[in-house]
């Protein structure tokens, strides 16, 4: 009778033990593993411990042998008890040992945020879960957790994930946010206090930008934007292309912290205090790059179809326009219409350039409203460029 199941796929031999591995069965399991490995030529071995309930020192010797004899070897899906054994004996320091992830279901859960990389669900009154679209998202999750910790240490109020879970074939980050509500939901439910919420929202943005970082501490937003603009060669007339590149290149080098996706669904109110989520776009650079993304979120993506904004943010397009303009007034402490218009034009130009590059990269003809948005970007860039001599403010 077989003591261990196995499968081989794309050169990876997976060994699947179940129950216990101890002194009573370890010799037979070792013999069976040797036979399986010999009969199945492979490039890597994975020990899937999902169904393993206990492993003794005799079982650890089997794992150690595999670690020494196999060029590529790892243990995956170790439950808490089994992982603790590996950890206490030092195996987690010399071998790749991966814990099993709790399984979550978000069926019927309220969606409180949606972006290019994932969807945020309210799991229960105390918990939200961000489920990543990419099934191979563990590196991205780890990166976002590190960025959130960095922001938190610098005094930016942000939620930090305390667990990683499996949601179907995808992964999710779990956050404890007791009774937190997004600003989008607050505004939709209490439109008479729109200005109060925008004031808090804009002041938090200024607090984020007041963090000035060291070179290389976060991804450089200027370098990323310049790469996008350079991808527009051949799409824009040469004169427009050259001026646009020059405007971005000549922006003063700044290391201000930038959230990168700052809209009312990514700011929550918890216990009377605003809290940021969705930190995977955290970067540094000139604040123009923050405002260009905000312009698209509130106006640009809804110009050809206002319902895009209402579908995304849950508020009418007219409310989104108010949020955008009031945010500029509070942030820059001015109601000077000429000053606000100047900042808006500069933000819009960078935003439309970014939007155009994305449409081309994503093959805009296959996107809903793709052609209309493409034509919009071409037209608005042509209109704005003659009005702008520099992007600084």
Image (spheres, rainbow, N blue to C red):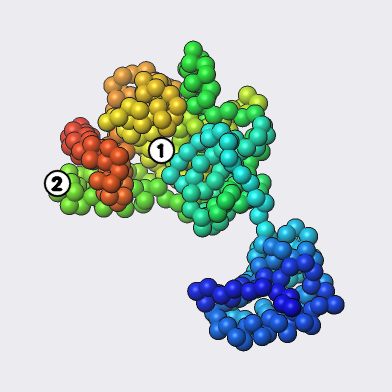
Judging depth in this view, the residue of 139 and 258 nearest the camera is 139
- Residue at x-position 64% and y-position 82%: 36
Residue 174: mark: none
In the picture provided, is 183 more to the left or to the right than 70?
left
Which structural element holds mark 2? loop
Residue at left offset 50%, top offset 21%: 187
Does residue 368 appear anywhere in the picture?
Answer: yes
The residue positioned 73% from the left and 59% from the top of the image is: 79
Instruction: Please tell me which residue lies in front, 36 or 149.
Output: 36
Tell me residue 275's x, y (percent).
Answer: 58, 33
In the depicted structure, whether residue 147 falls above or below residue 32: above
| Residue receiving disc 2 | 237
Q: Residue furthest front?
A: 1
In this rendered view, identify the residue nearer to me: 275 or 336.
275
313 versus 32 height, above or below = above
Q: Residue furthest right?
A: 24
Residue identifier under label 1: 290
């Amino acid at each position: 009778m077989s003591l261990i199941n196995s499968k081989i796929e794309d050169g990876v031999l997976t060994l699947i033990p179940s129950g216990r591995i101890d002194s009573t069965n370890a010799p037979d399991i070792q013999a069976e593993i040797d036979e399986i490995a010999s009969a199945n030529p492979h490039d890597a071995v994975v020990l899937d411990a999902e169904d393993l309930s206990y492993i003794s020192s005799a079982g650890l010797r089997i794992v150690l042998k595999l670690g020494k004899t196999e060029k590529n070897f790892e243990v995956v899906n170790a439950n808490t008890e089994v992982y603790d054994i590996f950890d206490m004996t030092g195996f987690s320091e010399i071998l790749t040992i991966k814990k099993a992830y709790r399984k979550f279901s978000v069926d019927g859960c309220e969606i409180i945020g949606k972006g290019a990389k994932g969807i945020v669900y309210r799991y229960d009154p105390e918990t939200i879960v961000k489920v990543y679209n990419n099934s191979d998202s563990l590196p991205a999750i780890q990166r976002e957790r590190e960025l959130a910790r960095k922001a938190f240490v610098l005094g930016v109020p942000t939620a930090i994930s305390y667990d990683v879970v499996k949601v179907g074939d995808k992964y999710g980050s779990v956050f404890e946010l007791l009774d937190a509500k997004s600003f989008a939901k607050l505004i939709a439910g209490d439109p008479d206090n729109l200005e109060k919420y925008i004031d808090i929202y804009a002041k938090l943005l200024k607090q984020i930008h007041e963090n000035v970082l060291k070179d290389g501490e976060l991804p450089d937003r200027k370098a990323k934007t310049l790469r996008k603009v350079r991808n527009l060669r051949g799409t824009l007339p040469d004169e427009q292309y050259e001026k646009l590149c020059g405007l971005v290149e000549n922006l003063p080098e700044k290391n201000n912290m930038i959230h990168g996706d700052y809209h009312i669904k990514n700011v929550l109110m918890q216990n009377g205090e605003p809290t940021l989520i969705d930190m995977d776009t955290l970067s540094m650079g000139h604040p123009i790059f923050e405002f260009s993304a905000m312009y698209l979120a509130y106006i640009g993506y809804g110009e050809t179809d206002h319902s895009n904004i209402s579908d995304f943010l849950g508020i009418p397009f007219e409310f989104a326009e108010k949020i955008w303009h009031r945010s500029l007034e509070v942030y820059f402490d001015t109601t000077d219409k000429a000053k606000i218009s100047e900042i808006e034009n500069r933000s819009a130009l960078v935003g439309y350039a970014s939007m155009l590059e994305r449409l081309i990269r994503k093959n805009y003809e296959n996107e809903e409203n793709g052609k209309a948005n493409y034509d919009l970007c071409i037209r608005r860039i042509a209109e704005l460029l003659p009005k702008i001599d520099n992007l600084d403010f």
